[in-house]
Image: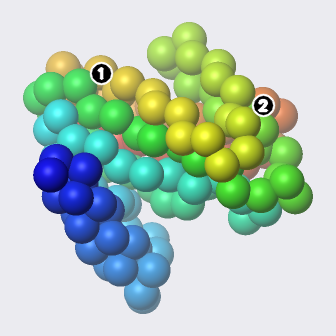
Amino acid sequence: MRMVLVGAFVLSLWGSVGCSKSDEAAQVPAGGELKVEANEKGFTPSAIAVKKGATSHLVFTRTSEQTCATEVVFPDLGINKELPLNKPVSIDIPADQDKTLTFACGMNMYKGQVVVK
Ligand SMILES: [Cu+2]
């Protein structure tokens, strides 16, 4: 049941991100979860806003072989995780205080930003 709710929420996010608001950050509620796709275009969404409160989760899935985003690095969190093809990898985002975290592929080519507020 919970997965269904999260799925519907993520779908509604994709909808709003996919339209004309591509410069607007994808919103994650406190303790929530957001799917991030890694493919030949980089990370989508790459601008993410996390509500301060409980730890949130970003679930990265690499969906293409034609990308160098075979890992995701969060330098501020000391996290460096492999992204196996089509295998979701969950990253905990501590959201106890205001902060801006960056993430990138292993070569620091594709980048993204998580703003906790
Ligand atoms: Cu790269």
Residue at 12% x, 29% y: name it. 53
Q: In the displayed structure, does residue 114 sit left or right of residue 116? A: right
Amino acid under disc 2: Gly
Badge 1 local density, few (<14 within 10 Å), some, or many (20+)? Answer: some
Kindly identify which residue carries mark 1: 94
Residue at 54% x, 34% y: name it. 89
In the rendered image, which quarter is residue 51 located in?
Answer: top left
Amino acid under disc 1: Pro
Where residue 42 sits: x, y (%)? 70, 56
Label 2: state its secondary structure.
loop
Quarter occupied by the C terminus: top left
Residue at 15% x, 26% y: name it. 54
Kindly identify which residue carries mark 2: 106
In the rendered image, which quarter is residue 50 located in?
Answer: top left
Label 1: state its secondary structure.
loop
- Gap in angstroms between the C-alphas marked 2 and 1: 21 Å
Where residue 19 sits: x, y (%)? 42, 87
Is residue 24 positioned above or below 94 on the image?
below
Quarter of the render that holds ligand 1: top right
- Residue 112 shows in the view: no
Q: In the displayed structure, does residue 93 sit left or right of residue 56? A: right
Residue at 35% x, 80% y: name it. 15
Q: Is mark 2 within 8 Å of ligand 1?
A: yes
